[in-house]
Amino acid sequence: MTSRSASSAARKTKAAFAKPTSPAQAPTKARAALAGGSARVVFVTGMSGAGRSSALKALEDIGYEAVDNLPLSLIAGLLAPKGLAGMSKKSARSAPPLAIGVDIRTRDFGVASLLETLDALMAQSDLDAHLLFLDASDDVLLRRYTETRRRHPLAVDRPVRDGIAHERRMLAKLRLRADRLIDTSDFAPGDLRRLVEGLYGLNKRGQLAVCVTSFSYRLGVPREADLVFDARFLRNPHYVPALKPHTGLDKDVGAYVAADGGFDEFFDSLTHLLTLLLPRFAQEGKSYLTIAIGCTGGRHRSVYVAETLAHWLRRQRFDASSDVLTVHRDIQGGGSGAESPTRKTKPPRAPQARRGAAQTTRAGKANSGKTRGR
């Protein structure tokens, strides 16, 4: 990539993290929010045991006023057209945004009535309404109920698995209608909170937050991934005895991966692709993007590429790295995530000849323990 094209690419990528330059480029809802003429309301629902309460708590922690299990018949009154709960429009705009939890335990709950309520609310010009649906696989939900020994709300007189199946049938239409679906099956503690903050953070309207995650193909592609890139073509440090116990967060592993003859071209092509995609995603109103980098075991190649890519993305912003999150899901070989800490440390250094290499990065925080995998 020439210096001129690289400079142009940097300007485009930086713009992807900023608010749209013209209101006409943003979707209708986003334009209203940016203009400050609408009050944000997030409805949080989903499968029991999928993390609805945790998502609601995360929203409350970042400044939302949370209301859980409010009877559906009272929602319309709370979100009256003349400002929230009868307040003046000026007062409503200065009030904190609302997060409303709704599930099958809610009094007078019904999917049809909830969808009817949502249709009416989304037609109001003074509301920026969203529907968030939390989900997880049946096996994961069953395990969570078994481990906590809690009773499923629809399994009072039947096995838990039957209650889960019944609830899934009940909520099928609501799931399809959701603006955002989050599958928490593979989430480690804290992952849901970080994702909710990225999606609904109050200081990020009109911005594109990016999560770069490494993973093991042996343990499956992350369900939440928007873009997936395969790093298994790079030479594998797993087969070097001195490097096998280490991870892509270590300098010697990083240097080994970066010295692969195909790494430079791969990384240049990857960043060039993202300079094209990120501005378009931002213009379409996308608020959160997950980029997944995979290798066989999720410990070496994918970790190094993810860290290097995350640093490259941060450099395009020329400011704090709060909107670029790095998660290493399988760095222990068991599928648990490890987030990079906020402190910045020197990255695993690559050969001098590598173009566009990261100069600094945040090292991922890997838990101790014996691991297997490549």
Image (cartoon, grey):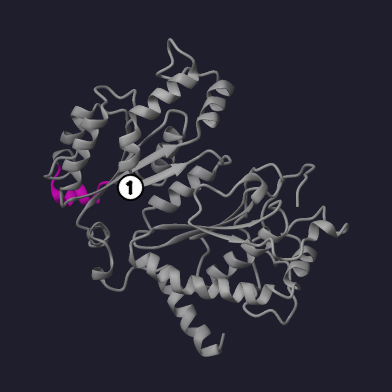
Determine which residue is flagged by label 1.
179
Main SS class of the magenta portion in the image: helix
User: Which quadrant of the structure image shows residue 370?
Assistant: top right
Segment tinted magenta in the rendering: 87-95
Going 21% across and 53% down the picture, which residue do you hit?
Answer: 38
The residue at 56%/41% (across/down) is 186
Q: Is residue 31 magenta?
A: no
Q: Residue 353: give x, y in percent of width and height.
A: 72, 82
Q: Dot 1: few (<14), some (14–19), or many (≥20) neighbours within 10 Å?
A: few
Residue 219 left/right relative to 14? right
Where is residue 46? Give x, y as percent.
Answer: 39, 34
Q: Is residue 318 at least partly visible in the picture? A: no
Query: As rendered, which of 150 and 89 lies closer to the eye?
Result: 150
Element marked by disc 1: loop
Q: Is residue 36 above or below residue 371?
A: below
Q: Position of residue 107 (x, y in %)?
A: 27, 22
The residue lying furthest to the top in this view is: 157
